Image (spheres, rainbow, N blue to C red):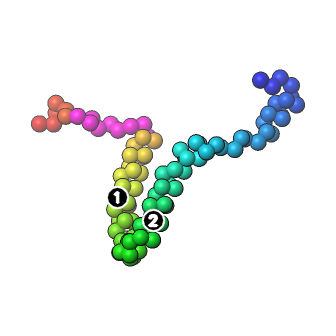
Amino acid sequence: MPKTETERAAAAAAPEPRPGARELAVRYGFIAITVALFVFFAVTEETFRQPSTLFSMLKFASVVAVVGLGVTLTMVVGGSTCPSGPSPGWR
């Protein structure tokens, strides 16, 4: 724990350590795998390179993105007020 003003200033100005391979893999691994699979199939499958395939993938991913945004919004505002199970009043 820095005690003097100079030690505190030096600690605050010290650069953050570079992230290690494990942290980078955890942070960017999913994106890297997704890009690698996309490139692999684009190279090996002729039908994968068609614009209709890309638009189909975007169409289906948009549904997941909208649901994910809804869940994120629910978590940000503090949860849902609707019960997740059956209620006595719902008959």
**Residue farthest to the front, as pictured:** 44
Q: Are marks 2 and 1 in contact (CB under 8 Å)?
A: no
Disc tally is: 2
Helix, strand or loop for disc 1:
helix
2 or 1: mark nearer the eye: 2
Q: CA distance from mark 2 to mark 1?
A: 25 Å
Asked if residue 69 is positioned above or below residue 6 in the image, the reply reads below
* Side (left or right) of 23 relative to 18: left
- The residue sitting at 47% across, 66% down in the picture is 39
Observer-nearest residue: 15 or 78? 15
| Element assignment for label 2 | helix
Camera-nearest residue between 4 and 30: 30
Q: Amino acid at mark 1?
A: Val
Q: Nearer the viewer, residue 60 or 4?
A: 60
Magenta part of the protein: which range? Answer: 77-85
Residue 91 x %, y %:
11, 36
- Residue 69 pos. (x, y %): 41, 51
Label 1 environment density (alpha carbons within 10 Å; few <14, some 14–19, many ≥20)? few
Residue 24 appears at what percent x and percent y?
A: 59, 47
Q: Residue at horizontal 58%, vertical 42%?
A: 22
The residue lying at 54 percent from left, 50 percent from top is 28
Which label number is shown at residue 40? 2
Q: Closest to the observer: 72 or 22?
A: 22
Q: Residue reaching furthest left? A: 91
Give the residue at mark 1.
Answer: 63
Does residue 30 belong to the magenta stretch?
Answer: no
Drawn side of residue 19 relative to residue 91, left or right: right
Q: Amino acid at mark 2?
A: Phe
